[in-house]
Amino acid sequence: MLDAPVDDTFTIAAAQIDVAIGQPGKNLDRMLQVLRETSAAGAELTVFPECALTGYCFESVDEALPSAQRIPGPATHAVAAACRELGTNAIFGLLEVDEDRLFNACALVGPSGVIGAYRKVHLPYLGIDMHTTAGDRPFAVHEAATPAGPARIGMSICYDGSFPECARVLALEGADLIALPTNWPPGSECTADYVINSRALENNVYYVAVNRVGTERGFRFIGRSKICGPDGSTIAHAPHEREEVIYARCSPALARKKRLIRVPGKHEIDRFKDRRPEMYGRITDARGRV
């Protein structure tokens, strides 16, 4: 891992926890407990799993709605109050209700309240995603205050990580760090082991993937949460299926330094300057496979 300037770092925590389906009050209490622990350990940002507030394996919108909330709403207000007391920030997954629509969402919350929210764009045929509405907002980057200055944070959720376009758009929007709350079941091992590092490397950003553990309605969740650096290296890893919190120091300056000089004048890499967007039209063509 590249060395980061000591005065330009902040600490993130990835909270690999279990979740109780349909018990948002219990899950919120657990997140607040963990947030106090991570803050005491020095974390300026703590990331929780996908649907950490609500659980994931609901079988219909009607079943899920009693656990869903608005953003802002009761859960974000409670997390904001804790962030204000502790001087920290948090990202957590939840089911968001908006009029007659239900979204798989996550919220970035700080001492002042909701800093930003994201609605999952890519929906697999699994769990509540079979019944939610696809995200309807562009990928966006939000600034969270840290002692090292503003950190530019982008969010996506679980299956979004399988689409490199998501991370690239967030990086082009200026993200220093991309957070991916997940609910990885068996079959996602290669995503956990390889894709996260690739997304960090190809975009020169910090990338934190935070999975849950435990079993929900017959689905087991595999853990394997990971924090990767801008060079694609693994900084911290929880490679098992038990609860654990992992930590990493992040330097926005490293993530913003897109031109990598390995041998001056002979070996220099700039994956942003060297892009050829005029050659990529097929990516935005909705025809799919030929």
Image (tube, rainbow, N blue to C red):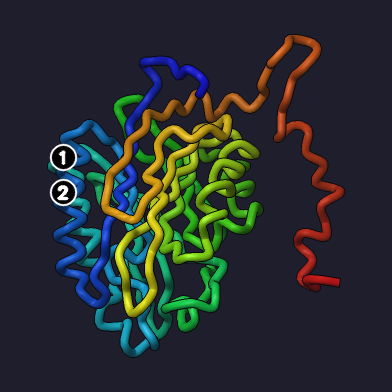
Q: Which residue is mark 2?
A: 82
Please give left or right for residue 193 compared with residue 179 in the image. right
Q: Amino acid at mark 1?
A: Leu
**Is residue 117 something one can see in this rendering?**
no
Residue flagged by tag 2: what amino acid is it? Ala
Q: Is residue 176 above or below residue 268?
A: below
Residue 110 placed where, x, y %? 27, 46
Residue at image coords 86%, 49%? 279
Q: Is residue 234 above or below residue 72?
A: above
Q: Are marks 1 and 2 in contact (CB under 8 Å)?
A: yes
- Residue beneath disc 1: 86
Instruction: Report if residue 163 is visible in the image.
Output: yes
Left or right: 272 in relation to 250: right
Q: Position of residue 138 (x, y in %)?
A: 56, 59
- Which secondary structure, mark 2? helix
Camera-side residue: 228 or 169? 228
Q: Position of residue 172 (x, y in %)?
A: 62, 42
Q: Quadrant of residue 38?
A: top left
Residue at screen point 53% across, 48% down: 193
- Residue at the image point whose x is 13% and y is 42% from the top: 85
Picture coordinates of residue 284, whole percent (x, y): 76, 62
Could you tell whether 204 is left or right of 110 in the image? right
